[in-house]
Each structure stands twice: as structure tokens, then as C-alpha cells.
């Protein structure tokens, strides 16, 4: 059975942009896309950025709804969702609504909703969360605690 290949879709100016501000010596998004970084439009503001296996991205990631890390990312991130796959590594600062870690995360991680650490997940650094789920085998270490505003609300109640 012969496979049919679809040409790449061109992005129009009216579609939301995915902004990646790379540091010196790092490929820009257009060049990195061909090497394994894929950007996909989403119905919500921003889109999904997938950093594939074997790819390294360093810099500041903006206007991203979901970051999926299969390779390595060293960045500052403000997004809705962070997903670090089994072989993925995220280092830096992240402020997200939800996070699921099956690989490694190091640095400052603030999760306003649910932080899920899978059995293969390793999270270290300064970690703040509203809710947490750690599967058997998952590891967390460092300065770990509830988001301070939530602690203050509980003390009042």
C-alpha cells in the first residue's frame, strides 16, 4: 500500500503565533521545526510546542498553551500545561496550571492546579503546587510546599 504525503500547511498571519525567544547559539523555531520541534495550533490562546527526542531548546517560551518535552529544554516558561515524557528533561522556571512529569524537572516549578509525578518522574528544586499526586516510584526533593496564597486561605478557615 503506497503512502500519500500531505504537504506542510502554511500559517497565515491571522493564526495565533507561537513565540520562542532562543538564546545565543540556539536554532530559531523555524530551523528547529525541521529538526524535530513541532508547533501546532490550538483552539485556545497559543498552541502546543513539542520538543522531540534528541532536540535541545534553550531560551524563553511564551504564548504556549502546552509544552511537551521529549528531549531537553532549558527555559523560562509560562503556559497552561507542562508534560515531561519519560526521557524528557526540563530545567528552569515554569509557572503552569497543570504539570505531568514522567522524566526529569529541575529548577523552580509553580503549578496552580494538579502536579502529577509519574512512577519514572523526578522533580527537584523549588516546587509549589495546589494539588499533588505522586505515583509509586515517583520522586520529589527540594523546597516543596503548597502555593503560599492557599496556605494563607487555609489558616483563615
Image (tube, helix red, strand yellow):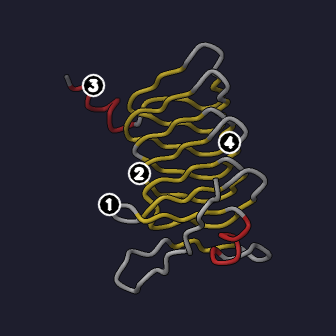
Residue at point 54%, 43% (across, down): 83
Q: Quadrant of residue 108?
A: top right
Which badge, 3 or 2, comes first in the chain's sequence?
Answer: 2
- Tell me which residue sits at (73%, 74%) in the image: 27
Up the image or down, 127 lies above or below 96; here it is: above
Q: Is residue 62 above or below residue 72?
A: below
Tell me the tag on residue 106.
4
Q: Which residue is mark 1?
A: 44
Q: Nearer the viewer, residue 41 or 155?
A: 41
- Residues at marks 4 and 1 touching, judged by CB atoms closer than 8 Å: no
Query: Which image quarter: residue 43?
Result: bottom left
Q: How far apart are the alpha carbons under marks 4 and 1? A: 27 Å
Q: Earlier in the sequence, mark 4 or mark 1?
A: 1
- In the rendered image, residue 79, in percent from the top left (x then y), is placed at 45, 55
Distance from Cα at disc 3 to Cα at disc 1: 32 Å
Depth check, front residue: 41 or 65: 41
Q: Position of residue 112 (x, y in %)?
A: 38, 41
Residue furthest top in the image: 136
Q: Secondary structure at mark 1?
A: loop
Q: Earlier in the sequence, mark 2 or mark 4?
A: 2
In the image, what residue occupies the spot 64% across and 78% down? Answer: 30
Q: Nearer the viewer, residue 120 or 74?
A: 120
Image position of 2 with respect to 19: above or below: above
Q: Is residue 68 left or right of residue 125?
A: left
Q: Secondary structure at mark 2?
A: strand
Sequence-wise, the earlier of marks 3 and 1 is 1
* Number of on-image labels: 4
Camera-side mark, 1 or 2: 1
Q: Residue furthest bottom?
A: 13
Q: Secondary structure at mark 4?
A: strand
Q: Check disc 2 and report the residue beneath it.
A: 80
Amino acid at each position: 500500500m503506497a503512502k500519500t504525503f500531505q504537504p506542510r500547511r502554511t500559517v497565515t498571519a491571522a493564526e495565533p503565533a507561537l513565540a520562542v525567544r532562543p538564546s545565543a547559539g540556539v536554532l530559531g523555531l523555524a530551523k528547529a521545526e525541521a529538526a524535530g520541534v513541532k508547533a501546532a495550533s490550538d483552539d485556545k490562546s497559543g498552541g502546543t510546542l513539542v520538543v522531540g527526542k534528541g532536540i535541545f531548546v534553550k531560551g524563553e517560551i511564551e504564548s504556549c498553551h502546552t509544552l511537551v518535552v521529549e528531549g531537553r529544554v532549558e527555559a523560562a516558561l509560562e503556559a497552561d500545561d507542562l508534560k515531561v515524557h519519560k526521557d524528557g528533561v526540563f530545567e528552569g522556571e515554569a509557572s503552569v496550571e497543570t504539570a505531568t512529569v514522567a522524566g526529569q524537572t529541575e529548577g523552580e516549578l509553580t503549578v496552580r492546579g494538579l502536579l502529577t509525578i509519574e512512577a519514572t518522574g523526578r522533580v527537584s528544586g523549588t516546587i509549589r503546587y495546589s494539588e499533588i499526586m505522586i505515583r509509586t516510584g515517583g520522586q520529589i526533593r527540594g523546597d516543596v510546599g503548597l502555593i503560599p496564597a492557599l496556605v494563607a486561605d487555609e489558616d483563615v478557615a
